[in-house]
Amino acid sequence: LGTALVLGLQLALPMDMTGRHTDLASFHAAGRAAAVGTNPYAITPELWVVELPAFGIRASTVNLNMPVSVLWMEASAPVDLTTLFRVSLLLNIILYGIALALLARSSATLPWRVAWAVCLAGFWQTLALGQIYLWMLPLVIGAWLAVRDQRFVRAGWLLGVLISIKPQFALWPVWLACIGIWQTRPIALV
């Protein structure tokens, strides 16, 4: 109940989203650049700049996602950043809920494990920064459940989508093959 109250307040109250403190702001800047035909991977003044003077570090949070991700970023370009952050926050919470429901349905998950999953710092950090990792979580769980149920074509589709978003997941089919599950091959999304 407390979590629902805090999240409801975050969605309802005005937020100061200047566009400099979230990964989502970098995605938004990339989308706006793509919408006008410029480089979505360029460093622009809108980006969040991380400065660690003691170490001589100054870096911008440029978009480092695959080109397929630029499609949704470009689609979000007309939306103002505060609205986009709120929608992203709500979408991330819903997707995490779906992921937890998939896990709970697939095994005898105890209620305290679900509570533990909601309390993970990574979950809250992902929400605070507007990252896209929770968007991939249902794909990961769906692929895992498909492999477990020997639905290898479904697993291949889900892995193909996942790999198109984050290529480092291309190692998963290799690992699956190493443990004897060679039937699961990512389906190319061409």
Image (cartoon, helix red, strand yellow):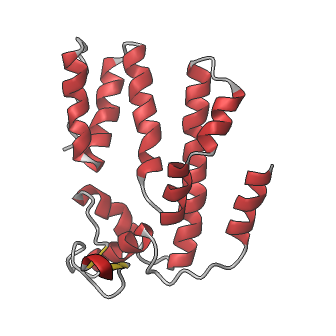
Q: Vertical placement of 96 versus 101: above or below?
A: below
Residue 26, quarter of the rendered image? bottom left
For this orientation, the residue located farthest to the bottom is: 45
In this view, the residue in front, 49 or 137, is 49
Residue 27, quarter of the rendered image? bottom left
Compared across the picture, whether 163 is left or right of 74 comes to left
Compared across the picture, whether 148 is left or right of 128 comes to left
Q: Vertical placement of 167 versus 77: above or below?
A: above
Q: Vertical placement of 172 versus 78: above or below?
A: above
* Residue at figure coordinates x 27%, y 37% from the top left: 160
Q: Would you say residue 182 is visible in this rendering? A: no
Q: Would you say residue 152 is visible in this rendering? A: yes
Tell me residue 173's x, y (percent).
23, 27
Q: Vertical placement of 75 versus 178: above or below?
A: below
Tell me residue 41's x, y (percent).
22, 72
* Residue at figure coordinates x 21%, y 34% from the top left: 171
Tell me residue 121's x, y (percent).
54, 51
* Residue at figure coordinates x 57%, y 74% from the top left: 83
